[in-house]
Image (cartoon, helix red, strand yellow):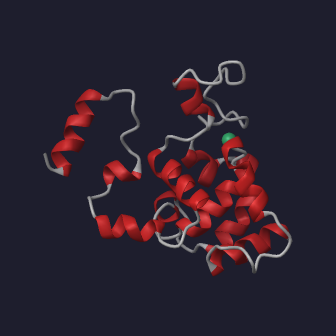
Amino acid sequence: MDWDNYRRSRDERSANVNLEVPPLVEPWSFNCIQAYYKGLTRAQSTMLLHLRTGVIGLRRVLFRMHLALDRVDSPLCECGTSNETALHHLVQCPLLSAQRQVLCDQVKDFSFLPLVTKHADLATVWAIMFFGIEQFNSAKEYLSRPGTDALNISAGGKKLLHSIKR
Ligand SMILES: [Zn+2]
């Protein structure tokens, strides 16, 4: 079955799945996808996979999957304007607007798709720092170490971290 047929079959079977995520709307291109992940640390690659698929430890997913029921009683973000999703946190949430400015300053075409494709090295650093997902605590600690030169991330990522820490 080719990629387009597979996507169509998913449309029919999965009413409860978000079909607008980049991996399902992009044309299939191994080279292209490989390029998005090139040079990322393991934690960044994991974060990028979560951002792109929408399967991420934020309220909408946790609530829908009935995970963490003791802590998550709603899919809504704390800001109350939308469900807590990767897209909402990355580009919309008003509670993160001050923090988001450093990312906007470095990305001219600031919107979700460019962030999870050609600017993935920056978006993943920012998401690890500000999404507040427990799974990424040790990666956040690594990125929070004093100085950025020794970190195994892109020059752009180092510049972003420098701006965050200022
Ligand atoms: Zn919000």
Indicate the position of residue 70 as horizontal and vertical percent values.
71, 18
The answer to whether residue 97 of the structure is visible from this angle is: no
Is 19 on the left or on the right of 55, as rendered? left
Is 166 on the left or on the right of 163, as rendered? right
Could you say which quadrant of the image residue 10 lies in?
top left
Indicate the position of residue 109 as horizontal and vertical percent values.
52, 71
- Residue at 52%, 48% in the rendered image: 50
- Residue at 69%, 33% in the rendered image: 80
Looking at the picture, tell me which residue is in the foreground, 30 or 104: 30
Indicate the position of residue 85 as horizontal and vertical percent values.
57, 41
Is 44 on the left or on the right of 25, as rendered? right
Give the quarter of the figure containing the C terminus.
bottom right
Indicate the position of residue 87 as horizontal and vertical percent values.
55, 48
Q: Which residue lies furthest to the left in this view?
A: 1
- Above-or-below relation of 77 to 130: above
Is 28 on the left or on the right of 111, as rendered? left
Looking at the picture, tell me which residue is in the foreground, 138 or 53: 138
Could you say which quadrant of the image residue 59 lies in?
top right
**How many marks do you count on the picture?**
0
The answer to whether residue 121 of the structure is visible from this angle is: yes
Give the quarter of the figure containing the N terminus.
top left
- Residue at 61%, 68% in the rendered image: 122
- Residue at 72%, 65% in the rendered image: 101
Write down which quadrant ligand 1 falls in. top right
